[in-house]
Amino acid sequence: MINSTHFSYFTLAAYSDTGLFKYLYFIIVMILYMLIICANLLLIVVICVNRSLHEPMYMFLCSLFVNELYGSTGLFPLLLLQILSDIHTVSASACFLQIFCLYSYGGIEFFNLAIMSYDRYLAICYPLQYNTRMTSSKIAVLTALMWIYPLLINALIVAGLTFPLQLCGNIINKVYCDNYYVIKLACSDTRLNNIFGLTHMFTVILGLILLIIYTHIRILYACFSGSKQTRQKALSTCTPHLASLLNFSIGCFFEIVQSRFNMNNLPNILRIFLSLYWLTCQPLISPLLYGLKMTKIRVLFRNMLFRGKTVTDNNIR
């Protein structure tokens, strides 16, 4: 008979004894986390306080930045705690909570990028009909969809499919909790988990990717067939979006490949980097890309800085 049980904790086995270097790693990761928080919060404030940015595109951008904060908070606090700890264990409840946060973050990110692609498609390909097609009620529905669906579907996956599994072990060979690695520890039948996961990936996720590809093909077509002003508008708004999408997709691809295939021939530090890439680089790159490349945000941010500097100089005088 297979010895299976519900464990009260999991061991994260990808950590190694780094001695005093753990304090250096802690400082580096803490600085990265602070940069992510500051960059995303800054752009959220810029969008919220400037009425000229209360447009659909910037509302979706604000949602994207909120999601970057959500995903980072699901990863970094526990990661920082584990770096300083000598015993790399995490309670089962905290582990499943982290799985829910990270997987729902990924789902919200894909939905957000897809909806932003659709918004740019309407703005560039149907500029005269844009205001009638992208109404405030439609913005509210799309924003609710991009958040509620990933949260509900991942609550079902974690609470309904993964948590009830009988496990034969509690060692996760990663630096954070991962749903697929928990499933691999199961002694009970996991066919339902695999079928549900693959079905969701090849329907919803693939559908979102196809939507993004289709909208950008139409946008590129409009660029080449339209006026110079249309091309400039398309390039200024779509370049950061495509770069963000490519970065996130590459990170997810690395994570999927590492989870499904044996990567033990790679150095441990490289495996850790690949598993953390989609969770650390995207929340930092997104605000940098949109903040630097989108002219309207960049100009408003510069005006806010210079206005604050002018007020300070006047007070000194």
Image (cartoon, rainbow, N blue to C red):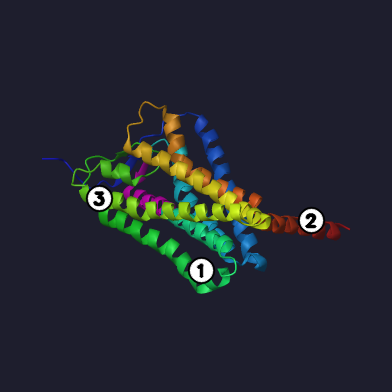
N-terminal-most mark, 3 or 1? 1
| Cα distance between the residues tagged 3 and 1 | 33 Å
Reply yes or no: does residue 299 show up in magenta: no
- Above or below, 17 against 50 in this view is above
Q: How many residues crowd around disc 3 within 10 Å: few (fewer than 14), some, or many (20 or more)?
A: few
**Amino acid at pointer 3:** Ile
Towards the viewer: 231 or 185 = 231
Of the image marks 2 and 1, the number of the one nearer the N terminus: 1
Q: Position of residue 199 (x, y in %)?
A: 29, 52
Looking at the image, is mark 2 or mark 1 nearer the viewer?
A: 1
Q: As shown in the figure, which amino acid type bears the numbered disc 1?
A: Ile
Task: Check disc 1: other Cα within 10 Å, few if <14, some if 14-19, many if 20+.
Answer: some
Q: Residue furthest front?
A: 225
Residue range in magenta is 89-106
> Mark number for residue 195?
3
Residue 107 appears left or right of 40: left
- Label 3, label 2: how far apart the Cα atoms are: 58 Å
- Secondary structure beneath dot 3 equals helix
* Residue 143: image location, x then y, percent: 48, 65
- From the viewer's perspective, is the residue at label 3 or at label 2 nearer? 3
Is 104 contained in the magenta span? yes
Sequence order check, earlier mark of 3 and 2: 3
> Disc 2 marks which residue?
309
In the image, taking residue 1 as reference, residue 282 lies left or right, namely: right
The residue drawn where x is 86% and y is 57% is 316
